[in-house]
Amino acid sequence: MAAMPHAPSPSNRLGLNYRDAAMALGPPPVRIIDVHTHLRGAHATRIYQDAAQHFGVSHTWSMTPLADVDTVRSVLGNTVSFIAVPNFRDDAFAHAMGPGFLEAIGAFHARGARIVKFWSAPRATTMAREAGCDDLMSLDGPWRQRQMRAACDLGMSIMTHVADPDTWFATRYTDRAAYGSKADQYAPLERALRAFPVPWIAAHMGGWPEDLDRLDALLDRHPNLYFDTSATKWMVRELSRHDRGALIAFLTRWSGRILFGSDIVAQEEHVSDASDGRGRSDQAASEREAFDLYASRYWALRTLLETEWSGESPIADPDLERVDPDRFGPMDAPPLIGKSVPPELLTTLYRGAAEAFTQGPVAG
């Protein structure tokens, strides 16, 4: 008897059984390293592990808060590596982003972390202002500069998030006096790339998957810069729009400098009442919904990269409604157009680039 389809949800608009869908995809050409996740809590991490294993992901890099590192490692063992991040939930926000994070970098390093994440999206401007320090989270700011120097002194690499989707600059960031243009976000990044010449990963295809020419020029100017494919909804929407030949040419030219990432967030709020009072997440409220949430990202990315599939994404994309509320609603999604990337490129994208970045084999 065929498995019953799942009820539609924002992570599964098409009612897919993601376990069956993983079997239909088959194994990837090489075991996948996901270099961009956010894992918290044992229960959610076990569900994430189940989804990852179904889709051929054998090793995970996670931006896990320092207090949760041991818990996540107890589930994933040597198949997880950690990326140092500040505690965004700390009530003493300015301390957590400043001296607190400077101290935490060393503690993360002692637990095996070899990458530090500096989140510097346009929204950080507002958060820093509310914390009473306008440049608290800027790559040009004194705290970030001290933290980057500390990371480099420990031999660590850097990950960063700059910019955001074009759709957000058309809707959320219309106050140019506060946020600047999208292009303005890159000047601090380029200065930091020159000042701290360690390997850097600019998350979410460098923050500009809409424009391969800009990404091409950025990689050409900075040989220490790498990208990852994380932020699945964003990647599906924008990479699907590119001509297959242009995308393949880009991936070919920069093979080894594009790493696979999903940006999956796995947390206890997805499966149980949160002990910190935040309650359940609106993304998932059961084990089944949490599995679909995590699995949907791997199904969408692998389908985009490996197949010629053409149809709507199974993941609702609220950016469509944000840009054009007369045409789209909260459950609508963009086309997902498979690019059938050649296996030799996928082998590097899925694993080889990450192993080269860390200068050695990765467990799992």
Image (cartoon, rainbow, N blue to C red):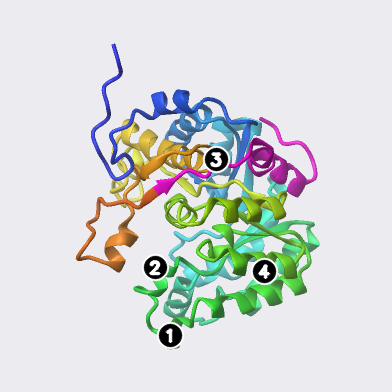
Mark sitting on residue 340: 3
- Disc 3 secondary structure class: loop
Q: CA distance from mark 3 to mark 2?
A: 26 Å
Asked whether the viewer can see residue 254, the reply is: no
User: Crowding at label 2, few (<14), some or many (≥20) Cα neighbours within 10 Å?
Assistant: some
Kindly identify which residue carries mark 2. Answer: 167
- Disc 4 secondary structure class: helix
Query: Which contiguous range is marked in magenta?
Result: 336-364
Kindly identify which residue carries mark 4. Answer: 218
| Left or right of 143 in this view: 37 | left
Screen quadrant of the C terminus: top right
The x, y position of residue 248, in whole percent, is 61, 50
The amino acid on which the numbered mark 3 sits, given as a three-letter code, is: Ser
The answer to whether residue 219 is above or below residue 180 is: above
**Counting residues from the N terminus, which is met first, the one under dot 3 or under dot 2?**
2
Residue plotted at (24% across, 55% down): 330
**Counting residues from the N terminus, which is met first, the one under dot 4 or under dot 3?**
4
The x, y position of residue 356, in whole percent, is 76, 45
The x, y position of residue 290, in whole percent, is 36, 37
The amino acid on which the numbered mark 1 sits, given as a three-letter code, is: Arg
Q: Nearer the viewer, mark 1 or mark 2?
A: 2
**Counting residues from the N terminus, which is met first, the one under dot 3 or under dot 1?**
1
User: Crowding at label 3, few (<14), some or many (≥20) Cα neighbours within 10 Å?
Assistant: some
Q: Nearer the viewer, mark 4 or mark 3?
A: 3
Magenta stretch holds residue 345: yes
Residue plotted at (68% across, 60% down): 158
